[in-house]
Amino acid sequence: MKVYGGRRGLAALLLALSAGVAAAGSTVLAIGPAEAAPTPVPFGSVLPAVAGSTSTPGVTYDIGAATTIYTEPGSAAAASIGGYLAALLRPSTGHPLPVTAASVPSPSDGISLLLSGAPSTVGNEGYQMEVTATSIVVRANRPAGLFAGVQTLRQLLPAAVESTTVRPGPWTVAGGKIVDYPRFAYRGAMLDVARHFFPVATVKRYIDEIAPYKINHLHLHLSDDQGWRIAVDGWPNLATYGGSTAVGGGPGGYYTKADYQQIVDYAASRYITIVPEIDMPGHTNAALASYAELNCDGVAPPLYTGTDVGFSSLCTSKEITYTFVDQVVGELAALTPGPYVHIGGDETQSTQPADYAAFINRVQRIVSAYGKTVIGWHDVVNATPPASTVAQFWGTTTRNAAVTSAAQRGVKVIMSPAGRTYLDMKYNSRTPIGQKWAGLIEVRDAYGWNPGAYLNGVGESSVLGVEAPLWTETIQSLSDIEYMAFPRLPAIAELGWSPYSTHDWKAFGQRLGAQGPRWRVMGLNYYRSAQVTWPAGS
Ligand code: NGO
């Protein structure tokens, strides 16, 4: 800072540059290492890129000892987002940051989180933020928008704000106005807790790591050949026996209903909807091993700890199979406030095509009867899904006639093309964990596609959103999860949130680089891709 001759001078320089961040192409815009004196972060460093912003050169707001957080009067949700913001800021700033209901429609000091006065264009998840010399005012139509605005504000503060111990500050925010809202309604991450099991604390931490990037769905792959991870009262062996191992033969584990409830509630507090998946009729060895009657020959196979796919199938001709599905889906639906139940449906080489179609069609009706919307891997379009079904595309090509014709019938698509979004693929041949069947995925590959124009005949209006799945055959710890997800997850998150007009690899690389110091402060284990310019020390 001294080198540049004062904070205000540098602030003005950065603000002037921020409007043209995409073109500037200079690392001067990246924030400095965690211990360097903070300078205002330009709006162009926010990831995902904001839909629109104007800077006010020379104006900044400093969060200080006297700053109050005001929230929409009468809104418990706004009060709790205020509490969340205060809890984020207090440890590093050391400031008290009291949270109180606003007593006037437009407080002239402090940080306000208000549910009035936002433009209708920001919808249910967007927000408007105005930063002046005396206040920061975030306005949204719904609490989800306030939460998104808080994530933006967090990124506009120096990386040291993520510290759990007091840092010197100053906690300066660049002046100006942001109007921001998502491109797609569904912006997801998936965690496979079946191949390896991850305890509640790990899932919560992952939720906290993806929330800053405005991800709003977390899909949990709760069952597979190697493990069943959710307690079902009517079928207790699923969890206690079917959940007792994992890939490689480890001890496995499962979520009790209380555990799952905790995950759902924690995710909800971060405006993330849990999407539970029970994969069927294939990928079911753990269930088949737990209950002999689910097998056509009435014989339970042994538990499985390998990594083959496509060898198991529920017995689609037995009535008990549908009793099973009904009870499992019924219990899961009762525990899940979100609108979706994911039924898997992928890789059913061991199920005859006609049996598969009949099974999926019947399961579809069961899920609907519990008031939930079906998501399935795109293989489900080989049945006859109604327009309400959501197909999750995981292919490696840009053409799929069956998905295209389903989309033409009104089926919406979540884009998870494996060669772009699969976080379990290696970055390069030297990546120590991960797979490579869908290709090597460097950061630029994860970022360099357009979800609304990727799959032939599946245009923007058929795309519900994007999701980055993390399969865990080779992933065993939080540190492994972080390494594979960061920095590719933020790339997919930006494709889901930001208008395609902001799509620019160079500018994105700078936004991504700006996250490095934050991740370092958080202790997040990310892959330091050589494609990205990481600020010194990150
Ligand atoms: C495939 C397969 C999964 C594997 C994953 C590994 C889908 C939808 N089914 O994706 O069972 O774990 O690849 O990358």
Image (cartoon, rainbow, N blue to C red):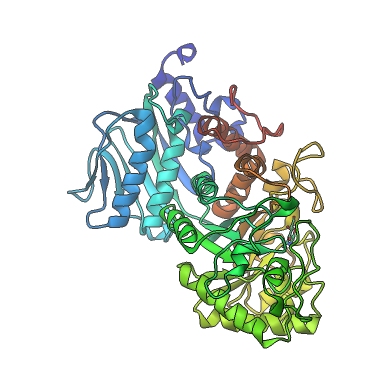
Ligand 1 is found in the corner quadrant, namely bottom right
- Residue 96, x across and y down, in percent: 27, 33
- Residue 407, x across and y down, in percent: 67, 74
Q: Is residue 116 above or below residue 384?
A: above
Q: Quadrant of the C terminus?
A: top right
- Residue 294, x across and y down, in percent: 70, 78
For the point 76% across and 38% down, which residue is it? 432
How many numbered marks appear? 0
**In this picture, residue 449 sits left or right of residue 97:** right
Q: Quadrant of residue 170?
A: top left
Task: Between residue 513 and residue 208, name the one nearer to us.
Answer: 208
Task: Between residue 218 and residue 331, name the one nearer to us.
Answer: 331
Q: Quadrant of residue 11?
A: top left
- Residue 267, x across and y down, in percent: 46, 55
Q: Is residue 201 above or below residue 38?
A: below
Q: Can residue 384 be seen in this snapshot?
A: no
For the point 38% across and 24% down, which residue is it? 169
**In this picture, residue 526 sits left or right of residue 106:** right
**In this picture, residue 389 sits left or right of residue 164:** right
Q: Is residue 11 above or below residue 225?
A: above
**In this picture, residue 530 sits left or right of residue 308:** left
Task: Between residue 538 and residue 411, name the one nearer to us.
Answer: 538
Q: Is residue 224 above or below residue 421?
A: below
Residue extending farthest to the left is: 103
Q: Can residue 145 be seen in this snapshot?
A: yes
